[in-house]
Image: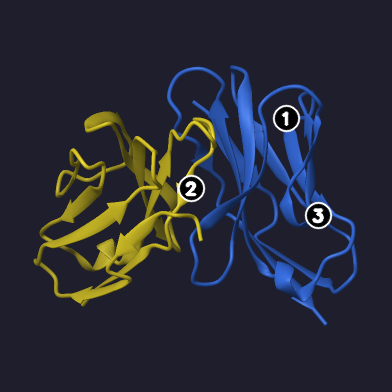
Chain colours: A blue, B yellow
Amino acid sequence: AQSVTQLDSQVPVFEEAPVELRCNYSSSVSVYLFWYVQYPNQGLQLLLKYLSGSTLVKGINGFEAEFNKSQTSFHLRKPSVHISDTAEYFCAVRASGGSYIPTFGRGTSLIVHP
Amino acid sequence: DSGVTQTPKHLITATGQRVTLRCSPRSGDLSVYWYQQSLDQGLQFLIQYYNGEERAKGNILERFSAQQFPDLHSELNLSSLELGDSALYFCASSGSLAGGLDTQYFGPGTRLTVL
């Protein structure tokens, strides 16, 4: 089985500052990794995913994440945030074989202040 | 807009009652997933259907059931409702040739309040 730990429940940051949202996973097999964003009163939307290949993955809205197998991490970064990035961010993991059911972390609330 | 629709948006009911939540997947998607999101449990996978057949089961209570119809829409039935069933229920779909099997597209959710 896989598990995901999002190390911060809340990350406050000022507009135009860089941000990193941390995600660590646990798995005995190869994994695929995902970041989803949930804006207020909306469903989850895929930001980016790592399936294979380059460990640096670029997503929508200027976000990127780096897969680090040795540290079992998949941290999400953005060099300069906007007010509109205020949302809940979920890291998810699933085994590369087998079912397509991901396991989600508890989420990190990104709060961007003006 | 993800292309996944869910009805109703809000549902308020009493303990002991039964409700049905409906989901229409994106055009072409064969797989439907149901999730429950609550403050204490986070986002929990309930059940998956693929082209009408149950494919995977997660933390779904026996009081809950689901099905996927020939037109691929899905319904989640919740019965003997308890206060603790109050949550956001999301439907997601995947399986389109365009998106690939690994991308799940989420609907806007149904907020269930049990009084």
Which amino acid lies under the numbered mark 1 shown in the image of this protein? Thr
Q: Are marks 2 and 3 on the same chain?
A: no
Dot 3 or dot 1: first in sequence order is 3
The reply, left or right, for residue B90 in relation to residue A56 is left
Task: Give the SS element for disc 2.
Answer: strand
* Closer to the camera in the image, A65 or B51: B51
Task: Left or right? Give the position of A110 relative to B4.
Answer: right
Disc 2 to disc 3, C-alpha distance: 20 Å
Q: Chain of mark 1?
A: A
- Tell me the tag on residue B54: none
Judged from the image, the secondary structure of the residue bearing numbered disc 3 is: helix
The residue depicted at 25 percent of the width and 47 percent of the height is B73
Q: Which mark is residue B105?
A: 2
Query: Percent position (x, y) of residue B78?
Result: 17, 56
Instruction: Say whether marks 2 and 3 touch (CB < 8 Å).
Output: no
Which residue is denoted by mark 3 in the rendering?
A: A62
- Location of residue B27 with respect to B82 vertically, above or below: above
Which dot, 1 or 2, sits closer to the camera? 2
Of the two numbered discs 3 and 1 in the rendering, the one whose residue sits closer to the viewer: 3
Determine the CA span between mark 3 and mark 1: 23 Å
- Residue type at mark 3: give it: Gly
Do marks 1 and 2 share a chain?
no
